[in-house]
Image (cartoon, coloured by chain):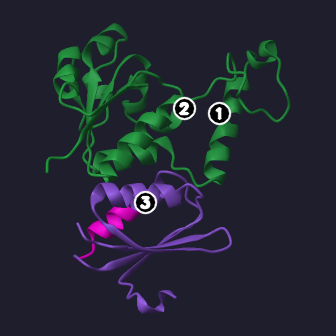
Chain colours: A green, B purple
Amino acid sequence: MANKKMTIIASKGSLDMAYPPLILATTAAAMDVDVTIFFTFFGLDIIKKGNADKLKISPIGNPAMPMPIPIPTLVGSLPGMEAMATAMMKSMFNKHGVATIGQLLQLAQESGVKMIACQMTMDVMGVKQSDMIDGVEFAGAAAWLDVAADAQINLFI
Amino acid sequence: MSADIKVDQVLDAKGMSCPLPILKTKKAVEALSRDQVLKVETTDPGSKNDMAAWAKRTGNEIVKVEEGSGTFTFFIKKTA
């Protein structure tokens, strides 16, 4: 029986939004699903060399963001608040035995997850192919559609 | 109760959160021969449903599940 297929479009580059595509991709691969992730717009940040563990989370515009004390929006915009929120989330993930983005990215590559970087958004944002981690392919919308048309699961994150 | 199950390999996934117990289980089962049994210990409360879904999808068999105080022990036979 042929493996099921899944594609994910990863369009966000914040710490919290980098987790869902990588968790689903690694788990799907472990369940014998062939996975393709198409990284576009800010999602490109996940697969830039040495960048996976530098992604940040913003306390701004997220009322659900857990904070030690309630932080007014204006205070959240002060210098250092983003770093504080990021450090706090990372410490919470670590405490609960959650893999880092870098670890998940490596596990995804080891388990054969195919990664495509969107060439158009790379050009717009001045990202070079050599800026990306090894093993990434470069293509556009048609390449994703070709895989997605035969996939049972297609997600936009 | 599990004394009658012959365990070939043990995986300690205690303290790990989703999706690590599944990813480690997949790797460990791949290293086994057919009909060998992997014992996996987890503390992730979600792992009970996750492990069942993983086994169903990959065609492996969960022979037995034991629940202790905050821990889950799975006996997984490689049947795929």
Q: CA distance from mark 2 to mark 1?
A: 8 Å
Where are the magenta residues, as a range?
Answer: B25-33
Label at residue A32 = none
The answer to whether tags 2 and 1 share a subunit is yes
What chain does badge 1 belong to? A
The residue that disc 3 covers is: B52
Report if the CB atoms under discs 2 and 1 are less than 8 Å apart: yes
Asked which quadrant contains residue A142, the reply is: top left
Do we see residue B65 in this rendering? yes
Front-lying residue, A98 or B18: B18
Image quadrant in which the C terminus of chain A is located: top left
Q: Position of residue A117 (x, y in %)?
A: 28, 24
Residue at the far bottom: name it: B4
Q: Position of residue B17 (x, y in %)?
A: 55, 54
Please rate how many residues cluster around mark 3, counting C-alpha atoms within 10 Å: few if below 14, some from 14 to 19, many from 20: some
Q: Is residue B53 left or right of residue A112?
A: right
What chain does badge 2 belong to? A
Q: Position of residue B13 (x, y in %)?
A: 51, 66
Which is in the foreground here, disc 3 or disc 2? Answer: 3
Q: Main secondary structure of the magenta part?
A: helix
Front-lying residue, B42 or A140: B42
Front-lying residue, A83 or B65: B65
Asked which quadrant contains residue A154, the reply is: top left
Q: CA distance from mark 3 to mark 2?
A: 29 Å
Q: Secondary structure at mark 1?
A: helix
The residue that disc 2 covers is: A15
Q: Amino acid at mark 2?
A: Leu
Q: Is residue A134 above or below residue A76?
A: below
What residue appears at the point 38 percent right and 48 percent down from the top-left corner?
A27
What residue appears at the point 41 percent right and 62 percent down from the top-left corner?
B24
The residue that disc 1 covers is: A86
Q: Amino acid at mark 1?
A: Thr
